[in-house]
């Protein structure tokens, strides 16, 4: 728990009720107003799939999808996401079966340490919803905000291409 | 990574692993059913669905959060620390300082020079001074700002030359003399004679800039000291065993009262291969408060924890004869170690010892000196100690080849060391697929159509390398196995494998499962791996020096084969056939004599064997043979097997901006047998990417120690300012697996995780020369440096001379 319970001046900030639409469910938590979306997801709602690699919007490991757009949860305020549709890595699998993107990332060796994977996956998921048959340059562009330190990206590109081929052309 | 020569030599009668009839490299039943296949990793689906649990995903009831106060000076005496205001804050539970953790630690037993919190002096900007435990991380942060530290600033040493020129500005009081961390001088053969008998001798100086690992997961741990006096520590470490030992020393706890658990680790690359302040501080704060304590480093703190690539200044004199034979190699190397020793003793040896393959050399001398400076401590980054000299040496070969008018691939081929031989410094080399690697990248890249033939601005370059498959000896001298495995078989048809091995994403847990599946005929899903938990798993030394596949794989092969024998024996008695006539594959146990009738599931076979032998379990272990040169330091660099790599890089240089784009890297790597080609390719591509990053982008640099304000301040400790390649920066990577089948590796396997990084940097440097006629002898090859060189002298003339120098018809 990382309760951001004081502000920069050291004054206590009172928690308030925050209502979030996450992975198709309405979830509520009591958090101080300066809580980031990432902290709310990870430490309040138990959705630890989204990762914190820098806490300042540099690495992309915290990427979630808000209203169809990939968003850096570590520099988004939770309260600003009320009333919006949030999807995290936990919400991508359908009825317990891995999404083709998840399956292909695994099969192709696109996840080594796996720490950037949730962010990569959400960026790719948002891409495929908007553009079901992306070219390799488009994939590289869509993932350019997600740093991966293990793979050299090649196997991730392959996985996204193969997942796209498994998905219907129009989503 | 090894025993410093002359102190304790390995005993002649050290343990020898059991020999298996038919050796270790073959399949149990003729053909492989699991090994060599493009299998999933066993934890892969947990990672892609967000279910894998990393250290920061762990939260225990009543858990506190701690933060570390860090020095604002590069070098300063600590006069006083006043924590009264911090302690007075509601929600702050404890503050500790150096006095609470006075014991020195360090990964190498002879150079223990670090304290978890500095007691008397801070030695770099970011050195740890005090730690606070509070109800929340924010509160702990606020409490840090209320701790007052009084410093007496001291002159800061921020570079190699300053360290040597000012021994009186002593960075580290544990040094034997001035700012010297380690000095090694070794000579093999008559170097001066060989150089004298050369047709060409080239002398040049190289600069390898420092860089850091930057794993995407920051270091994190949770310590839980319970009422019985037992400490459990979850940590994002890659060396649970060494951490276990140092925790006991520093905390003054009996080691049998400490349990270290490594959760899933989000990348390490050598950056988590020794204990850090956070682990000791979290443990001590848990002992003080009686509550679990978590510490999660910020990204900035990860840059200070560092242990990354050592900056090195390398001078080489290298000779060659007209026929292409390499003669003498003479190296002088200065190493910037940062404030502490870390693995520095080994780094200093490795900077020389790991250069002696894949080429034969007539004679070799190196003189390496590591110095202390007031900067975060350097240590082992992927390709520990040998990436820097490899860069310099492979550039030297390129220059020598040009000087005698030969193709650089031909020169490398002409000096091939061979297999089943010894290097000039006495290292035993067994399997060696380097020639196949060279040929593979030569063909795949279209080398013959491109080298010295592309238009000005574009070019190709080649380089080769070798690396160890595990270091031959443990960091602390002992005669116990380097890797242990236990396997438990269940009547349900399940196997559980217990091993101290550390999976940091490279797939060592999966290697364990592949071996067991192959030997016992199980489906991968029927195998559970319990790893890196000191309460549950036998010791494996951890994930460093590319040792896991080779050593863990061998230990597991040993344990699994013992069980296979028991099952075969029970079934052969039941069916009245020979033990060797029983096969276990694809979930079925049968005799080859009458597989239609003499046949049952592997589950039933386990039950038959349990009824015959009693409860089923086995242990296996690996200990490397006695190896190394017979001289002080001769064990450092010794490995039971070596991997080999060759790269070709193709670059495109922008003459207006000095920007170098690496279009493609072709990587051929001899990993022995590839146990899973997907994960081997992943290691090759990740290594090549990381080498490319060091060549063109990355710099762990600090403000100089001039009277200017802020000496020793990190240039930009964030993932925005410290630039690592994105998906748009990274070149096209082509991996080609070469399988030389090592006689001692598990199924013939060798390492793949570090070797393929080495040639990236010199291959790119050599390609830039082919493209624009400038020699890149200093890293990184970024636009300011390239532009400066393009504008000084006449690179175009050098480029034209170079292409004229290659004999026609090539």
Image (cartoon, coloured by chain):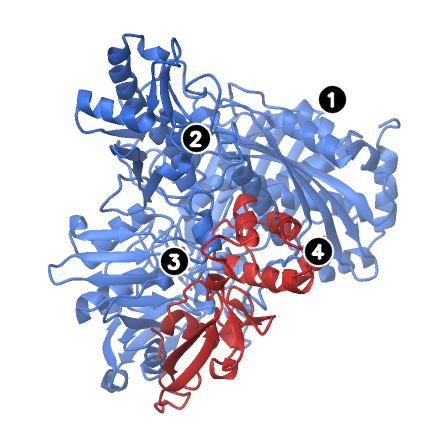
Chain colours: A red, B blue
Q: Say what secondary structure mark 2 lies in.
A: loop
Q: Position of residue B56 (x, y in %)?
A: 37, 63
Q: Which residue is mark 1?
A: B323
Q: Position of residue A15 (x, y in %)?
A: 36, 87
Side of B738 relative to B46 (left or right):
right
Mark number, residue B54: 3
Chain letter for the residue marked with disc 2 in the picture: B
Q: Hey, which quadrant is residue A16 in on the image?
A: bottom left
In this rendering, the answer to whether B258 lies above or below B153 is above
**Mark toward the start of the polypeptide (1 vs 2):** 1
**Mark toward the start of the polypeptide (3 vs 2):** 3
Mark nearer the viewer, 4 or 2:
4
Q: Say what secondary structure mark 3 lies in.
A: loop
Chain letter for the residue marked with disc 1 in the picture: B
Compute the Cα span from label 1 to label 2. Answer: 32 Å
**Mark toward the start of the polypeptide (3 vs 1):** 3
Mark nearer the viewer, 3 or 1:
3
In this rendering, the answer to whether B30 lies above or below B111 is above
| Residue at the far front in the pictured view | B597
Compute the Cα span from label 4 to label 1. Answer: 55 Å
Q: Hey, which quadrant is residue B627 in on the image?
A: top left
Q: Say what secondary structure mark 4 lies in.
A: loop
Q: Which residue is mark 2?
A: B639
Q: Which residue is mark 4?
A: A133
Chain letter for the residue marked with disc 4 in the picture: A
Neighbour tally class for label 1: few under 14, some 14-19, many 20 plus, Cα within 10 Å: few
Mark nearer the viewer, 4 or 3:
4
Say yes or no: labels 3 and 1 on the same chain: yes
Neighbour tally class for label 3: few under 14, some 14-19, many 20 plus, Cα within 10 Å: many
In this rendering, the answer to whether B426 lies above or below B173 is above
């Amino acid at each position: 728990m990382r309760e951001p319970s004081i502000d920069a001046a050291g004054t206590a900030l009172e928690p308030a009720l925050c209502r979030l639409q996450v992975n198709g469910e309405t979830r509520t938590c009591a958090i101080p107003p300066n809580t980031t979306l990432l902290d709310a997801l990870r430490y309040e709602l138990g959705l630890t799939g989204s990762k914190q690699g820098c806490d300042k919007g540099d690495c992309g490991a915290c990427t979630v999808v808000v209203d169809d757009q990939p968003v850096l949860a570590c520099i988004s305020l939770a309260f600003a996401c009320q009333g919006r549709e949030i999807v995290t890595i936990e919400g991508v699998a359908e009825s317990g079966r891995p999404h083709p993107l998840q399956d292909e990332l695994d099969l192709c060796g696109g996840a080594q340490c796996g720490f950037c994977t949730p962010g990569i996956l959400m960026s790719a998921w948002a891409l495929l919803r908007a553009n079901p048959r992306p070219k390799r340059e488009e994939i590289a562009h869509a993932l350019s905000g997600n740093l991966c330190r293990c793979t050299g990206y090649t196997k991730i590109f392959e996985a996204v291409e193969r997942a796209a081929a498994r998905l219907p052309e129009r989503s | 990574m090894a025993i410093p020569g002359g102190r304790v030599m390995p005993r002649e009668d050290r343990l020898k692993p059991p020999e298996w009839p038919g050796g270790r490299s073959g399949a149990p039943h003729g053909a492989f059913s699991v090994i060599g296949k493009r299998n999933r990793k066993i934890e892969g689906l947990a990672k892609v669905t967000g279910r894998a649990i990393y250290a920061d995903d762990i939260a225990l009831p009543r858990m506190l959060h701690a933060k570390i106060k860090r020095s604002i000076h590069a070098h300063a005496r600590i006069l006083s620390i006043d924590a009264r205001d911090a302690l007075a804050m509601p929600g702050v539970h404890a503050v500790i300082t150096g006095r609470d953790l006075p014991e020195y630690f360090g990964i190498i037993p002879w150079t223990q020079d670090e304290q978890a919190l500095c007691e008397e002096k801070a030695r770099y900007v970011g050195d740890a001074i005090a730690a606070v435990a509070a109800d929340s991380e924010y509160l702990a942060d606020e409490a840090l700002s209320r701790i007052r530290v009084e410093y007496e600033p001291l002159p800061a040493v921020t570079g190699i030359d300053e360290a040597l020129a000012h021994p009186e500005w002593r960075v580290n009081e544990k040094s034997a003399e001035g700012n010297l961390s380690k000095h090694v001088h070794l000579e093999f053969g008559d170097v001066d004679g060989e150089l004298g008998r050369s047709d060409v001798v080239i002398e040049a100086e190289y600069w390898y800039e420092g860089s850091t690992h930057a794993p995407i997961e920051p270091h994190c741990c949770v310590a839980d000291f319970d009422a019985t006096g037992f400490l459990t520590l979850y940590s994002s470490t890659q060396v649970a065993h060494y951490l276990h030992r140092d925790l006991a020393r520093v905390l003054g706890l009996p080691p049998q009262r400490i349990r270290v658990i490594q959760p899933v680790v989000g990348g390490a690359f050598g950056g988590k291969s020794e204990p850090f302040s956070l682990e000791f501080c979290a443990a001590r704060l848990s002992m003080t408060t009686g509550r679990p304590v978590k510490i999660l480093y910020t990204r900035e703190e990860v840059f200070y924890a560092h242990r990354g690539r050592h900056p090195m200044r390398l001078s080489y004199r290298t000779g060659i004869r007209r026929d292409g034979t390499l003669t003498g190699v003479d190296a002088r190397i200065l190493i910037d170690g940062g404030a502490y020793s870390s693995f520095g003793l080994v780094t200093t040896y490795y900077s020389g010892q790991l250069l002696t393959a894949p080429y034969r050399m007539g004679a070799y001398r190196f003189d390496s000196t590591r110095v202390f400076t007031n900067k975060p401590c350097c240590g082992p980054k992927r390709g520990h100690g040998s990436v820097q000299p490899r860069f310099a040496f492979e550039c030297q070969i390129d220059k020598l080849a040009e000087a005698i008018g030969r193709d650089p691939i031909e020169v490398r081929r002409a000096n091939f060391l061979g297999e089943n031989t010894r290097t000039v410094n006495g290292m035993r080399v067994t399997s060696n697929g380097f020639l196949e690697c060279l040929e593979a990248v030569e063909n795949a890249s279209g080398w013959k159509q491109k080298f010295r033939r592309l238009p000005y601005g574009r070019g190709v370059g080649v380089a080769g390398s070798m690396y160890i498959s595990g270091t031959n000896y443990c960091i602390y001298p002992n005669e116990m196995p380097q890797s242990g495995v236990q396997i438990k078989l269940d009547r349900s048809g399940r196997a559980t494998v217990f091993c101290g091995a550390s999976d940091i994403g490279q797939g060592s847990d999966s290697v364990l499962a592949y071996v067991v599946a192959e030997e016992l005929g199980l489906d991968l899903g029927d195998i559970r791996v319990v790893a890196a938990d000191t309460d549950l798993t036998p010791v494996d030394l951890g994930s460093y020096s590319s040792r896991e596949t080779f050593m863990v794989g061998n230990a597991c092969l040993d344990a699994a084969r013992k069980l296979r024998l028991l099952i075969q024996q029970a079934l052969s008695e039941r069916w009245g056939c020979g033990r060797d006539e029983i096969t276990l594959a694809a979930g079925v146990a049968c005799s080859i004599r009458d597989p239609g009738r003499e046949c049952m599931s592997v589950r039933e076979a386990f039950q038959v064997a349990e009824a015959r032998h009693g409860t089923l379990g086995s242990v296996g272990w690996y200990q490397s043979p006695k190896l190394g040169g017979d001289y002080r330091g001769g064990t450092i660099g010794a490995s039971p097997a070596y991997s080999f790599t060759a790269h070709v890089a193709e670059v495109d240089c922008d003459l207006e901006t000095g920007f170098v784009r690496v279009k493609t890297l072709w990587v051929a790597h001899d990993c022995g047998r590839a146990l899973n080609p997907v994960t081997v390719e992943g290691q090759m591509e990740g290594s090549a990417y990381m080498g490319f990053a060091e060549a063109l982008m990355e710099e762990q640099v600090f403000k100089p120690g001039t009277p200017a304000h802020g000496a020793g301040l990190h240039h930009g400790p964030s993932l925005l300012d410290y630039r690592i390649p994105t998906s748009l920066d990274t070149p096209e990577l082509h991996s080609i697996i070469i399988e030389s089948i090592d006689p001692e590796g598990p199924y013939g396997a060798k390492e793949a995780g570090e070797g393929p990084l080495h040639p990236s940097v010199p291959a790119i440097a050599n390609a830039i020369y082919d493209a624009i006629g400038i020699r890149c002898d200093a890293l990184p090859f970024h636009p300011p440096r390239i532009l400066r060189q393009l504008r000084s002298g006449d690179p175009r003339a050098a480029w034209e001379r170079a292409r004229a120098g290659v004999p026609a018809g090539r």
